[in-house]
Amino acid sequence: MSRLTIYTTVLLLLFATNPLHLQAFHKATSKSNLYNTFASLYSSVTTTSHQNYFLFSIQHKRSAPATLNVGVLSQWVPVSTSSFLGKALKSKSRGGKEDVIIQISTVHSIILIGWLFLGSTHRGASFMARHFVASRNNLSQGRIYTLITSSFSHADPLHLVFNIFMFFQVGRVVLPSLMSRFELKMFLLASSLFSGSVSVLVNNFVLKRNVQLLGFSGCCYSLLAVVSIAQPTSKWSLFGMTMSPVEFILGSMFMDFLARRNRVDVLCHVGGVFYGYLWMNACTGGFADGLCQPMHWLEMYPPENWGSIDMRKWSLLWVSVWLGCGATALCMMKPLET
């Protein structure tokens, strides 16, 4: 049995044995009776909320405010909220709404485990490199999705810890005062497309360097740019030093460079900051208004149920898609010479 098969099987097992999934299956397949009715009523009275993160669930109980239950492999395991795991999983979301930060951190962790488990074999490493790295070679093969999947991909734990720490810090500021949960998800997808495309285009076709891109830094710096514009007087802490948002961006870039040196793609970071700047300032009367004109000409309007995504933000989402398509097309027309 290959490592890829084992990895996929474990993920499916965790998904199938998620207690919330088992409860839903039981409810759908069993007949209603007095016992099930009372069990459901008791659960609703004693539980404040559930959050489903696909491979595991979190349950908040009324009777034990200092603990939360983590549901995995069909079991509910109590975890103290004062522990490291409890603090990491403690969500501000209630009423069944999942915490976006925990959702995204879970995706990162799953892909990191894929790198660590599959990367030790040639076949597994080749699979991860084809589908979770943004590069000229991958785009020349039409794998435009790698501009997104590479943003959620980290090949070593230190890289993941640094980016998740930054995302946790800035995400708590962004939600819900600056973005809704849905808008944040759309913004992260768009900023990953934009920053990855900038990196591939400039590195390969201007600087003539073949760069293998992965990591969440571009998205994090996009969010930092949004916060620095929306809250310019706010204060941030970096290793005990109080900084303005702009100073925090520059300090984080410098610390990232010191920690990983030649493995840091500064162009991806710059592309992320620029997209955050566009998100806040483009098409507001005088700056880059032309970016929003094509959507008006084409009469392509955002879906009515997309809430906070207005026509301006809808247009900027498409700007990242066009740039990603352009980068892919250019790489397909000029593939790497072998």
Image (cartoon, helix red, strand yellow):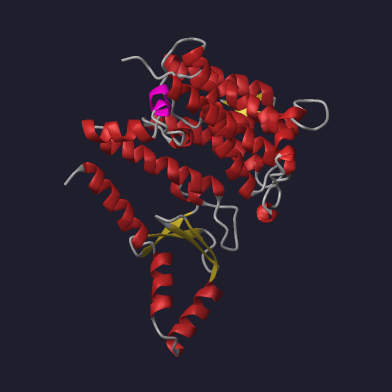
In the image, residue 93 sits, relative to residue 112, either above or below, namely below
> Is residue 269 found left or right of 177 in the rendered image?
left
Res 178 → quadrant: top right
Read off the magenta span. Answer: 135-140
Q: Is residue 95 covered in magenta?
A: no
Looking at the rendered structure, the number of numbered marks drawn on it comes to 0
Q: Position of residue 70 (x, y in %)?
A: 42, 58
Q: Position of residue 248 (x, y in %)?
A: 63, 24
Residue 240 seen anywhere in this rendered image of the structure: no
Res 293 → quadrant: top right
Residue sitting at 50 percent across and 32 percent down?
A: 216
In the image, residue 163 sits, relative to residue 109, either above or below, namely above
Residue sitting at 47 percent across and 43 percent down?
A: 105
> Is residue 203 found left or right of 243 in the rendered image?
left
Which is nearer the eye, 48 or 253? 253
Residue 37 seen anywhere in this rendered image of the structure: yes
Which is nearer the eye, 107 or 322? 322
Q: Main secondary structure of the magenta part?
A: helix
